[in-house]
Image (tube, helix red, strand yellow):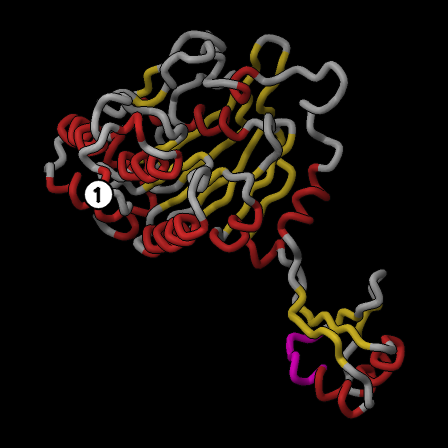
Amino acid sequence: MTTTAAAREGHIRIEGLTKRFGHFTAVQDLSFEVEPGRITGFLGPNGAGKTTTLRMLLGLIRPTSGSATIGGHRYADLPRPLATVGAALEATNFHPGRSGRDHLRVLADTASVPVTRVDELLELTGIPAAARKRAGGYSMGMRQRLGLAAALIGDPQVLVLDEPANGLDPEGIRWLRGFLRHLSDQGKTILVSSHLLREVEQTVDDVVIIANGQHVRSGTMVDLHGTPGAVVRTSDADALAGALRVADVTSTLQEDGSLVADTTDLRLVGDVALRAGLPVYGLEPKRADLEQLFFELTAGTNRNLGDGAETPPAEASSAGAPAGSPPAGPGPDGRPTTDDEGVTP
């Protein structure tokens, strides 16, 4: 496949997407795009509509209106879904009595993938030692790795992952970060929902933030970090601000007493402070905190925290499925299998 063709196949477009469950609107007129070769973080408070959106993208829930396409096609219309999209929406989508290796072998056989791919993925995801153990005995972190291996069985161009870092220890999270970067460097499209904001900040290239089912903010991490600068703390901020002006550097006094200088040259700020005879207690690059930005954008907007707030059925459980029922997901052939609850005719 040519680079152009792969990019076209891997482009995700969400346009005017809306989903209503009775009188409850889980997702409302949502639009965004995910580009190939980049990791996009999909963020929002619990109940914001993230999982509902991902399920509509994968054909598990029918939209009330709008569209969700991959390479210009609905998931249900993809000729080879497992070779186009790999998805891991839940870490329990396997038979608990079947070994991890056998779970992957079933998927490989369905997708006409050589069994050697199974052993390759077991190595890649770091679970070869547990491959012959029953998956029902796996830890949450091991289940996440098995789910990721299953999503990659057909070597898809697109990966859709819902909270993939859940249950991973710090070493596992670091491994996941490097693994996703390796995949994106191969030109794959990666859409990741997560509530681990600081981890997302170290992993993704782009961010889409939603609240109450609506788009709130999106952009590259570079854009969201805002104008670069230097944060400096000293004993006399006003004196340092004056010294910086002499060096043609403007600065702004912050509420906590620090100065934000409009330069990325930390050495320059330090030299100015030294010449002015001022001690420096702290000097670091200015970066917007994704967690702070997230809470600023979504503060007071979580529809599930107010009095009498309804809980969106698709976010509270598996698209309204009764507790304890098997999770809905792509069937053995990669086609969607879904119950009828909450699906608009």
Given residues 9 and 127, the one toward you in this image is 127
Q: Residue at x 59, y 29 (%)?
A: 46
Secondary structure of residue under mark 1:
helix
x and y, in percent, of residue 201 in the image: 54, 52
At which x and y percent is residue 146? 29, 36
In-image side of 308 versus 16 (left or right): right
Marks counted in the figure total: 1
Residue under the image location 37 percent in, 52 percent down: 175
- Residue carrying label 1: 129
Q: Is residue 290 visible?
A: yes
Residue span colored magenta: 263-269
Q: Quadrant of residue 299?
A: top right
Amino acid carrying mark 1 in the image: Ala
Identify the residue at image location x=26%, y=25%. 334
Residue 152, above or below 249: above
* Quadrant of residue 148 within the rendered picture: top left
230 or 335: nearer the eye? 230
304 and 281: which is toward the camera: 281
Residue 11 percent location from the top left of the image? 39, 41
Q: Quadrant of residue 326?
A: top left
Answer whether residue 146 is magenta in the image.
no
**Residue 294, image x, y percentages:** 65, 44
Identify which residue is drawn at 55% across, 34% down.
31
Answer few, some or many: residues within 10 Å of disc 1's Cα (few below 14, many 20 plus, some between 14 and 19).
Answer: few
Residue 125 vs 84, above or below: the answer is below
Which residue in the rendered view is the most extreme toward the bottom? 275
In the figure, 149 relative to 341: above or below? below
**Is residue 37 visible in the rendered structure shown here?**
no
In this rendering, position of residue 7 left or right of residue 116: right
Question: Dividing the image into 4 quarters, which one contains the C terminus?
Answer: top left
